[in-house]
Image: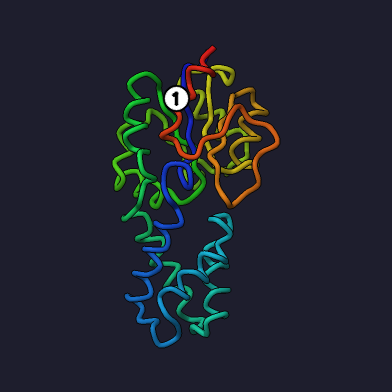
Amino acid sequence: MIRALLFDLDETLVNRRETMRVFLTEQHHYFKLEFYCSAEKFSESCLFHQCNGYASKEVAYSKASNELGIPTKTVSALLKNYKDHYGKKAFAFPGSVETIAQLALNFPLGLVSNGTTRGQMGKLHHTGLLPYFDSILISESFGVKKPDPTIFLACLQELGVHPNEALFIGDHPDADIQPALSLGMKAIWVQNNNFPPPTKCHGQVKGVSELPELLPSLAS
């Protein structure tokens, strides 16, 4: 029986690419980088080198700057600006907030996310998702990143459920789905073009708004 739902954040509830694209466009304007490239080229280069959010931001900025001819000294300023301001403006996928609000009426909800604490909490606050979660664990403050099982187990403990009583919903086959399954949780993959489908899962959705329809078949 499913007693709790656990979620990934980026590319599951929040459109990380759009959130980052808007942020990078604002950085391009703030740091007056139009001398070197267009805002579109800057954002696309940074996004490419971020490898769907899993690459070091310092490395991504360095590679993008080198590619576009932006002075090396600007990288540290871009990185500091990212650490101070990223996440203050975020974009949830259509229907995500409404679905989470609906699910919170019947299940305790947990969130397990890699990323900076300030950035991820900023996204939760800006999108209106924050009040619905009973447990929020972010890798920077917790000290380990997914797929390390300890961050999943800590969330389950805070929710007061065993792994076989929980369902995890995420977009990354290796960082979300595989560790959840290995702990004995059920897992739903959010379809995307960034990764190939997981070899095993308990279902797939195009977006979390499809979850309420799918849950009855997983409840027993």
Q: Amino acid at mark 1?
A: Glu
The image quadrant that residue 67 belongs to is bottom right
State the residue lying farthest toward the bottom: 35
x 58%, y 51%: residue:
193
What residue sits right under mark 1 in the picture? 213
Residue 102 screen position, x and y as percent: 33, 26
Q: Quadrant of residue 198?
A: top right
Residue found at x 29% / y 41%: 128
Q: Measuring from the top left, give residue 129's x and y in whole percent.
A: 33, 38
Q: Nearer the viewer, residue 69 or 75?
A: 69
Seen in the picture, residue 14 relative to 136 is either above or below; the reply is: below
Which residue occupies 41% across, 46% down? 14
Residue at the right extreme, as displayed: 199
Looking at the image, which is closer to me, 79 or 188? 188
User: Observer-nearest residue: 136 or 66?
Assistant: 66
Q: Residue at x 42, y 25 (%)?
A: 212
